[in-house]
Amino acid sequence: MEQKNAMNKPAARPAAAAAPKGESKGGGSSSFAVIAILVAFVVSVLIYIFILGDGSHFQGGSNENNPLSGDYFGVVYKGGPVVPVLMTMFLCVFIFSIERALTIGRAKGSKSIETFVRTIRQKLNVNDITGAIAACDQQKGSVANVVRAGLMKYQEMSRERNMEKDQKILAIQKEIEESTALELPMLEKNLVIISTLASVATLTGLIGTVLGMIKAFSALAQGGAPDAVGLANGISEALINTALGIGTSALAIVAYNFFTSKIDELTYSIDEAGFSIIQTYAAQHGETDHHAA
């Protein structure tokens, strides 16, 4: 999977005092990931044993027999022990996709991100910094937090009389970069799990396919008449694992690309708002910043 570069734009590292905050968030996210994977595995095993493997889906009421005609629960059960592993991967993609959707939704804020950026630019055009900060407070979310930090630094630099104009612009730019470095990396948390599942699910399905084909050829290799039931079960196991692996991988790829594109949109919005803040300061403070004390 191609790694996105949009999240690496900020050149400045977060201040040392802010590092524990990021580490705390990362620890919480890691704990959530471990718990989610364990829960998905337990749920998958229970579904496999008690729902898919229920005797009502098989001839003679036993899951050792062939599944009833048209009963897909029984057919999937015959996929073998690799099925609950693939089901775990599928549930993980589903869980982490919901978690990322909620996180990115909160990062956008309460209103459309395009409308928010447009409002900030309009406030900056009339040099209404207080109004722009109020808009950030109403918007909330990661994007608004970064823009608000830049605007607060804007006000601070406007009152500063002991720095040159270029130094003030650099200070505003650094503040935006540091705020971005704190906010945006959290949006990529757990995306690496989704991207990993996109590859691993296909390989796991392939393992199940190989195991199923081994059973099928073992049935053919028996002396005398081939074991038709064993042959059918082996082929069924191979095809079911292939289908589950490919389906899970396809879902993971779609989810990963969707969320990375959303993160890119947020990054672009922050860049656009940050550029407007810096340009407005440079235009509004063209002559007054040369009176160094």
Image (cartoon, grey):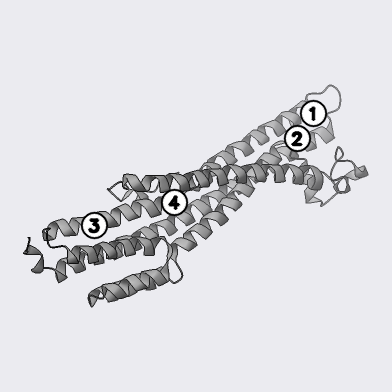
Decide: marks 2, 1 in contact (CB < 8 A)?
yes
- Which quadrant is the C terminus positioned in? bottom left
Nearer to me, 79 or 184:
184
The image shows residue 86 at horizontal and vertical percentages of 65, 42
| Other-residue count near label 4 (Cα within 10 Å), few / some / many at <14 / 14–19 / ≥20 | some
Report the disc number at residue 219.
1
Residue toward you, 121 or 138 = 138
Q: Amino acid at mark 2?
A: Gly
Give the mark count: 4
Q: Which label was assigned to residue 234?
A: 2
Q: Residue at x 42, y 57 (%)?
A: 263
> Quick check: 75 left or right of 271?
right
Q: What residue sits 75% from the left and 35% below the top?
A: 234
Q: Secondary structure at mark 2?
A: helix
Q: CA distance from mark 3 to mark 1?
A: 70 Å
Mark pair 3, 2: CA separation: 63 Å
Mark 4 → mark 3, Cα distance in angstroms: 21 Å
Q: Nearer the viewer, mark 3 or mark 2?
A: 3
Q: CA distance from mark 2 to mark 4?
A: 44 Å
The label number, if any, that marks residue 173 in the structure image = 3
SS at mark 1 in the image: helix
- Taking the spot 34% from the left edge, 60% from the top edge, the residue there is 146
**At label 3, which amino acid type do we have?**
Gln
Q: Residues within 10 Å of mark 1 (few under 14, many from 20)?
A: many
Residue 184's image quarter? bottom left
Name the foreground residue: 116 vs 265: 116
Label 4: which secondary element:
helix
Q: Residue at x 55, y 43 (%)?
A: 31
For marks 3 and 1 on the same chain, the one whose residue lies earlier in the sequence? 3
Residue 246: where, in percent of width, then height?
60, 45
